[in-house]
Image (cartoon, rainbow, N blue to C red):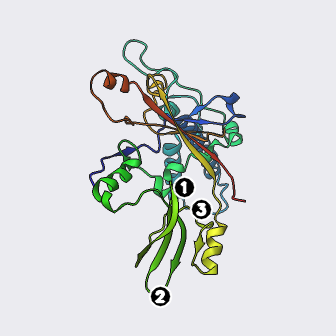
Amino acid sequence: MSVSLEPFIQVNYNAYLHAQDAFGGKPQRLRHVLSDFHGGVTELLAKAVSQDKLDQPITAEDKELLLTALRQWGALDANYAYKAGELSSERRGYEWDPDGGLSGDGVPSEPLPFAEILRSRVWVRLALGQIFEFQSTIFQPAGGMDMIARAFAREVGSLIRYNAKVTAIKRDSQRVNVTFVDARTGGAPMTASAEWCLCTIPLSVLDQLDLDVGDPMREAINAVPYGAAAKIGLQFKRRFWEEDEQIYGGISYTDLPIWQIGRSQHELWQPRQGRAARRLRVRQPLCLRVYRAAARG
């Protein structure tokens, strides 16, 4: 249907993780938390392996391989310690980046205390990018998700009936019959009949309709809870998350009600001509998604 796609950046190591009661309330770069969490865990495991403290013994050859792997994965030094230095800074970043000149070695950064990372619980966000349906590279429609709906309207617009409020879904031995009214004017109920019905009505609305389904299906429809959610798009004159924070795409997480902050990597508005186009280009979107756990009553 000629819907243009673009990469959707799920994981950005320069994005933030935030918890109100951790790190003095200051957001932390995902790369800092990830590197320091890996470093802390691998340091503990490496020390247990090197001291033969594992419950299940391993061969001497496997022990050396495991220790070598842990040092590489966790950026540990020769003593299996994760601490401030070039090794850890190559993962988490430097306090002052290496550059040219006589003082170009860079200044190593100081890792976050491992105990504070554990207590912060921000590690619950670290694996989200490894979930099967969120893994890279995934795509999104350029210009917003409604580009898919617009493409349907463009290709099969004559078959679409708008403002149809469904009131009942019934079936007989041969067909499915959907009763609806005009949502704008009301009026007499109308019926559409077909061999198949692909229903995309949310379950929290579907359970309010007159449905011709069996008890197991009805119980399943009624049992599914929904979380209240809202997605808010904000406009700014400049992309400060890129210019000031060096965050290009990806999602930052917080334990505040907004839960996650996504930065767009595209222009959400259609281009225009002349002065309007110049004004349009400075309208930069930042999206906040608000989630609250709310089971239906």
* Residue 130, horizontal then vertical, whole percent: 49, 52
What distance separates the C-alpha of mark 2 from that of mark 1?
67 Å
Within 10 Å of the Cα at label 3, are there few (<14), some (14-19), or many (20+) other Cα atoms? few
**Residue under the point 57% across and 78% down:** 212
Position of the N terminus, as image quadrant, is bottom left
Please, what is the three-letter code of the amino acid marked with disc 3?
A: Val
Q: Nearer the viewer, residue 68 or 262?
A: 262
* Residue 167, horizontal then vertical, whole percent: 55, 67
Within 10 Å of the Cα at label 1, are there few (<14), some (14-19), or many (20+) other Cα atoms? some
Earlier in the chain: of badge 2 and badge 1, it is: 1
Residue matched to label 3: 205
Q: Can residue 41 be seen in this view?
A: no
Query: In which quarter of the view is residue 53 placed?
Result: bottom right
What distance separates the C-alpha of mark 3 from that of mark 2?
25 Å
Query: In which quarter of the view is residue 222 placed?
Result: bottom right
Nearer the camera: disc 2 or disc 1:
2
Q: Is residue 296 left or right of residue 154?
A: right
Q: Nearer the viewer, residue 190 or 3?
A: 190
Question: Number of marks in the image?
Answer: 3
Q: Nearer the viewer, residue 226 or 272?
A: 272
What distance separates the C-alpha of mark 1 from that of mark 3?
58 Å
Nearer the camera: disc 1 or disc 3:
3
Q: What element carries label 3?
A: helix
Residue matched to label 2: 173
Q: 148 above or below 122?
A: below
**Residue under the point 48% across and 29% down:** 235
Q: 82 above or below 297?
A: above
Outermost residue to the top: 102
Residue matched to label 1: 63
Please, what is the three-letter code of the amino acid marked with disc 2?
A: Ser
